[in-house]
Image (cartoon, rainbow, N blue to C red):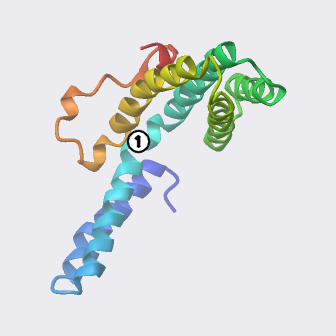
Amino acid sequence: MIHNFDVQLQVALRALQDVVAPALAGGEKHVVEQLMLAIATIGFVKTRLPEARRYYRMELRGWIDLAKEAAQVAGSSDAMADAIGAGERALGDPDADIAEFESASRHLSDGVTALSHASVGRSHHARLDSLILERGRSRVAQYRLWCAPFGFELQPEKLPKPAWISTGDSLLHR
């Protein structure tokens, strides 16, 4: 058994590309399409696996920063303070895994959404929405960059540099 993830993924890709794909030549179109999707997905995971922890930590830092700024604009709640605290604890925990970063990010995203929803009709609504949209631009650019190995970007060279490789700057302040 191979213990190295990178090697395991490479072996699986090679088997799918060099053995399974040729055996399906002339097969039903949807079967071949599903195989190509599986190959692309495994290739993506192989490419991004070494950077995944840094990426999800960067994403969580960005959500924490946005949540703090949103709370300054709209007023904080106990739920938002708890979500921010949980996110900061996850970042500070050397044993935290990607699932914990994703969960904390989701809770913060939900909290920001709740603040935005509650701000409708209030004096700070436009300011909060503007903040969310402004910070969202850099987040979306990083999402696009993260998914660039799938090959859907027409001009990937025009995307920003990966923020997850930086020295810990917040994504939202780029």
Label 1 environment density (alpha carbons within 10 Å; few <14, some 14–19, many ≥20): some
Image: 1 above or below 69: below
Q: Position of residue 156 (x, y in %)?
A: 22, 34
Q: Position of residue 145 (x, y in %)?
A: 33, 34
Q: Residue at x 49, y 58 (%)?
A: 2
Task: Tell whether 10 sits left or right of 76.
Answer: left
- Determine which residue is flagged by label 1: 48
Q: Residue at x 57, y 29 (%)?
A: 57
Image: 149 above or below 3: above
Q: Position of residue 64 (x, y in %)?
A: 63, 23
Of 81 and 4, which appears nearest the observer?
81
Q: Quadrant of the C terminus?
A: top left
Amino acid bearing label 1 = Arg
Of 59 and 25, which appears nearest the observer?
59
Q: Residue at x 51, y 29 (%)?
A: 54
Of 83 and 145, which appears nearest the observer?
83
Tally the numbered discs: 1
Q: Residue at x 63, y 17 (%)?
A: 123
Of 3 and 151, which appears nearest the observer?
151
Task: Tell whether 144 sits left or right of 77.
Answer: left
Task: Tell whether 145 sits left or right of 130.
Answer: left
In this view, which residue lies farthest toward the front?
A: 121
Check disc 1 and report its element: helix, strand or loop. Answer: helix
Q: Position of residue 69 (x, y in %)?
A: 62, 15
In this view, which residue lies farthest toward the right?
A: 78
